[in-house]
């Protein structure tokens, strides 16, 4: 998100701005709030989130040469660097690939990770039991002749 001007300069003029606000997203992640809740009104206006956002001093430096050099070496890479200064310490990291990407294979999401994400993302609408039943159907989708069984599970209240 840091590379996009709209995310760096977002000042939360409207409720919809939260999904593009770096401070809000970082505060939610730092406070270990699950992503599917980041845009709920009670999270947007949570005093802990608001207070944390005020403590963040963001400085974004985009090194296009570093990114381009990494792309020349491996066209599948998305070179990213981060430096975080917190509590008197500096933490640095370099990432070449996004977790959950198709390549390289070792960064693909596991079935368990996908299941957890699906169950969590649907938790506001369906029970965990129904979500897990939907997952079992989805993982055998190629055997399904019609979508009705899956839709029935997800549509039931």
Image (spheres, rainbow, N blue to C red):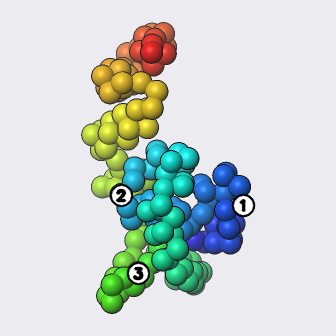
Going by the image, does 113 lie left or right of 74?
Answer: left
Residue 128 visible in this rendered orientation of the protein: yes
Residue 134 percent location from the top left of the image: 37, 22
Residue 40 percent location from the top left of the image: 53, 45
Q: Which of 109 and 26 lies nearest the eye of the viewer?
A: 26
Q: CA distance from mark 2 to mark 3?
A: 17 Å
At label 3, counting other C-alpha atoms closer than 10 Å, the crowd grade (few under 14, some 14-19, many 20 or more) is few
- Tag nearer the camera, 1 or 2: 1
Residue 10 percent location from the top left of the image: 67, 67
Residue 125 percent location from the top left of the image: 46, 27
Would you name the residue on which mark 3 appears? 84
Location of residue 151 with respect to 91 vertically, above or below? above
- Which numbered disc covers residue 32? 2
Would you name the residue on which mark 1 appears? 13
Q: Which of 45 and 83 lies nearest the eye of the viewer?
A: 45
**Between disc 1 and disc 3, whose residue precedes?**
1
- Tag nearer the camera, 1 or 3: 1
Residue lying furthest left: 112
Q: Residue at x 41, y 81 (%)?
A: 84
Q: Residue at x 30, y 22 (%)?
A: 129
Residue lying furthest right: 13
- Which numbered disc covers residue 120? none
């Amino acid at each position: 998100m840091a590379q996009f001007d709209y995310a760096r300069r977002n000042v939360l003029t409207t409720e919809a701005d939260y999904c593009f606000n770096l401070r809000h997203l970082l505060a939610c992640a730092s406070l270990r709030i699950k992503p599917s809740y980041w845009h709920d009104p009670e999270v947007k206006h949570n005093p802990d989130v608001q207070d944390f956002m005020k403590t963040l001093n963001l400085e974004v430096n985009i090194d296009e040469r570093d990114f381009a050099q990494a792309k020349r070496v491996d066209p599948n890479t998305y070179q990213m660097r981060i430096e975080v200064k917190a509590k008197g310490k500096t933490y640095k990291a370099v990432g070449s690939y996004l977790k959950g990407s198709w390549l390289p294979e070792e960064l693909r999401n596991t079935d368990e990770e996908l299941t957890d994400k699906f169950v969590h993302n649907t938790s506001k609408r369906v029970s965990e039991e129904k979500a897990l039943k939907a997952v079992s159907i989805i993982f055998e989708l190629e055997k399904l002749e019609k979508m009705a069984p899956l839709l029935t599970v997800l549509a039931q209240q």
